[in-house]
């Protein structure tokens, strides 16, 4: 009688051979393939073909897995830059909205008219003070000009660096 009740395929009833004991079921896959049955008969060509196939597989894997990751990381950097720009634009828009609110008041209108078109109310006098012209920097050599040149150089250089202890 059969051990399996779900199939009609008869199982072999002969016991396993003594020579099969300890033998792998993967024996067909682990035995060397005869030269005439190989796809490529020469070992160097087979090695080159195998390396070429691995190279193609590696290239495809890189294109599928590595390049999208790099693009994703670049998008994160781009998002940070865009968020910084958005924050700056929102800050500027807030300042402009505050300026519009200020200019909608009567004092704001009066101040803008004074700055833009020089509006003067009744009883006021208008006086314009022009900025001083820039001082000449190409002074002649000799006294007292070398002292003045040194003073100008010291003022444009800024404060002296603090000496470290």
Image (cartoon, rainbow, N blue to C red):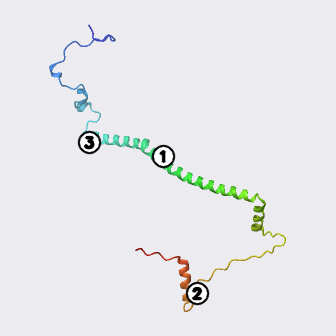
Q: Are marks 1 and 3 in contact (CB under 8 Å)?
A: no
Q: Which residue is mark 2?
A: 139
Furthest residue in direction right, as rendered:
122
Q: Secondary structure at mark 2?
A: loop
Q: Is residue 58 above or below residue 97?
A: above
Residue shown at the point (57%, 86%) measured from the top left = 148
Q: Which residue is mark 3?
A: 44
Task: Tell me the CA gap for discs 3 and 2.
Answer: 84 Å
Q: Is residue 163 above or below residue 2?
A: below
Measured as percent of width and height from the top left, residue 57 is found at 37, 40
Q: Earlier in the sequence, mark 1 or mark 3?
A: 3
Left or right placement of residue 133 versus residue 32 in this view: right
Task: Tell me the CA gap for discs 1 and 2.
Answer: 60 Å
Left or right placement of residue 54 versus residue 72 in this view: left
Residue shown at the point (49%, 50%) measured from the top left = 74
Could you say which disc has been placed on residue 51 in the image? none
Furthest residue in direction left, as rendered:
18
Measured as percent of width and height from the top left, residue 53 is found at 34, 40
> Which marked residue is nearer to the observer: mark 1 or mark 3?
1
Q: Which residue is mark 1?
A: 72
Measured as percent of width and height from the top left, residue 134 is found at 64, 80
Mark 3, Cα crowd under 10 Å, few <14 / some 14-19 / many 20+, is few
Quarter of image, res 109? bottom right
């Amino acid at each position: 009688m059969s051990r399996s009740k779900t199939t009609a395929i008869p199982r072999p009833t002969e016991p396993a051979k003594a020579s099969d004991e300890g033998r792998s079921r993967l024996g067909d896959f682990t035995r060397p393939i005869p030269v005439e049955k190989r796809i490529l008969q020469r070992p160097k060509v087979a090695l080159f073909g195998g390396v070429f196939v691995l190279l193609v597989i590696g290239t495809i894997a890189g294109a599928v897995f590595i390049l999208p990751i790099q693009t994703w990381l670049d998008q994160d950097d781009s998002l940070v830059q865009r968020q910084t720009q958005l924050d700056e634009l929102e800050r500027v828009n807030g300042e402009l909205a505050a300026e519009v609110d200020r200019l909608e008041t009567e004092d704001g209108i009066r101040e803008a008219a004074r700055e833009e078109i020089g509006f003067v109310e009744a009883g006021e006098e208008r006086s314009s003070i022009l900025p001083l012209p820039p001082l000449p920097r190409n002074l002649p050599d000799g006294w007292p000009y070398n002292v003045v040149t040194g003073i100008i150089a010291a003022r444009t250089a800024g404060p002296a660096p603090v000496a470290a202890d």
